[in-house]
């Protein structure tokens, strides 16, 4: 089977539009005008670069609340579909990002690291802070990697815009449907990976990645802009956990896990779980280097990955905090 064809991951069958300002992007919060939860006017929520100087840094003393979206969280099967966009990927992956990413998503499902997302839910009152047994909860199943697609027949645009990335996500949904693979729009995220040297504007200086949503002929879909993370070096996680050559790829799973956990708890931004400043569960715990919630190597199903912590409303007797495992 050629790389241009659909692949089910073997082990599991298996200028950007900143609607507000670049300050919002570096703060790791929503950037869009109008109704933030409407897929027709999509919000994009950005992961800040390491050491970003900004006045709207997420506060680590405010819990997340439910913002009324249905869907607001990923429920049920909870799948990830990886897309490597453009002929720029052909024989051109110097850091081995694709294999590292696929390995991560083959292990993260069912892990205690990802379990904190299951405390969040939908179909409860807007403003809810603790779901308990109410509502429909986010899930943490094993086998989240549905598959991957090398869409490399033609070149991707240079520095693709948000609308171009959204269109590629819609094309990926069409491709997946055409292969006969069924999926639920409320339980899948499409991760659009751009090749080295072909990242969207602002990457590595204002943000490391972002997630959003778009309309498609298969209904609204959640998608992530995942640049070639090692192009940004330390700004997006190189050597943040591990030293030397082993740490040069730390950012791939730190940033990938950040966006994965955020999409699970805010699938169509911003109708899921955010704090009063607009920060999601990943934003509030980004780039912690020491103390509670510091990024670390975490073992998932026998494999170890550098990841950041995620915010848990339930931590510290419901005071909230950044955790690497749950409960």
Image (cartoon, rainbow, N blue to C red):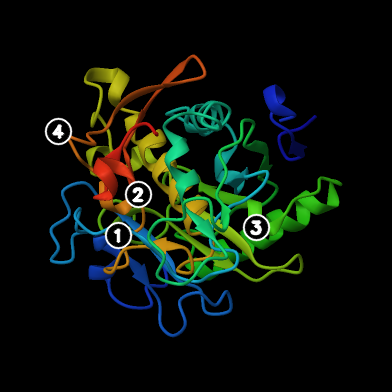
Residue bearing the label numbered 3? 186
Relative image position of residue 111 (x, y in whole percent): 49, 28
The image quarter in which residue 171 lies:
bottom right
* Residue drawn at point x = 64 percent, y = 51 percent: 188
Nearer the camera: disc 1 or disc 3: 3
* Mark sitting earlier along the chain (4/2): 2
Quadrant of the frame with the C terminus: top left
Quadrant of the frame with the N terminus: top right
Pointer 1: residues within 10 angstroms few (<14), some, or many (20+)? many
In three-dimensional space, the C-alpha distance between marks 2 and 1, rounded to whole angstroms, equals 9 Å
* Residue drawn at point x = 59 percent, y = 49 percent: 85
Residue bearing the label numbered 2? 282
Residue bearing the label numbered 1? 28
Seen in the picture, residue 306 relative to 129 is either above or below; the reply is above
Q: Residue furthest bottom?
A: 34
Relative image position of residue 251 (x, y in whole percent): 34, 36
């Amino acid at each position: 089977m050629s790389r241009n064809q659909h692949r089910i991951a073997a082990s599991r069958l298996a200028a950007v539009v900143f609607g507000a300002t670049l300050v919002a992007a570096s703060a790791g919060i929503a950037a869009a005008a109008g109704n933030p939860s409407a897929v027709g006017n999509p919000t994009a929520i950005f992961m800040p670069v390491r050491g970003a100087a900004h006045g709207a840094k997420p506060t680590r003393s405010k819990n997340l609340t439910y913002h009324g979206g249905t869907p607001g969280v990923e429920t049920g099967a909870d799948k990830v579909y990886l897309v490597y966009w453009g002929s720029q990927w052909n024989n051109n992956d110097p850091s081995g990002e694709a294999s590292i990413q696929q390995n991560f998503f083959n292990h993260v499902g069912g892990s205690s690291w990802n379990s904190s997302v299951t405390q969040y839910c939908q179909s409860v009152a807007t403003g809810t802070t603790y779901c308990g047994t109410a509502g429909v909860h986010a899930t943490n199943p094993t086998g989240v990697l549905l598959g991957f697609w090398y869409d490399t027949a033609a070149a991707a645009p240079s520095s693709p815009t948000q609308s171009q990335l959204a269109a590629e996500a819609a094309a990926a949904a069409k491709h997946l449907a055409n292969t006969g693979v069924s999926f639920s729009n409320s339980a899948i995220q499409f991760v659009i990976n751009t090749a080295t040297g072909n990242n969207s504007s602002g990457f590595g200086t204002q943000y490391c990645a972002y997630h959003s949503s778009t309309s498609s002929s298969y209904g609204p879909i959640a998608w992530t802009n995942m640049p070639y993370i090692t192009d940004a070096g330390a700004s997006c996680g190189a050597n943040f956990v591990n030293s030397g050559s082993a740490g040069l790829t730390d950012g791939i799973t730190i940033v990938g896990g950040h966006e994965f956990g955020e999409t699970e708890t805010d699938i169509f931004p911003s109708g899921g779980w955010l704090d009063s400043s607009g920060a999601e569960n990943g934003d509030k715990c980004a780039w912690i280097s020491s103390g509670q919630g510091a990024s670390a190597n975490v073992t998932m199903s026998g494999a170890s990955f550098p990841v950041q912590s995620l915010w848990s409303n339930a931590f510290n007797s419901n005071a909230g905090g950044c955790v690497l495992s749950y409960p």
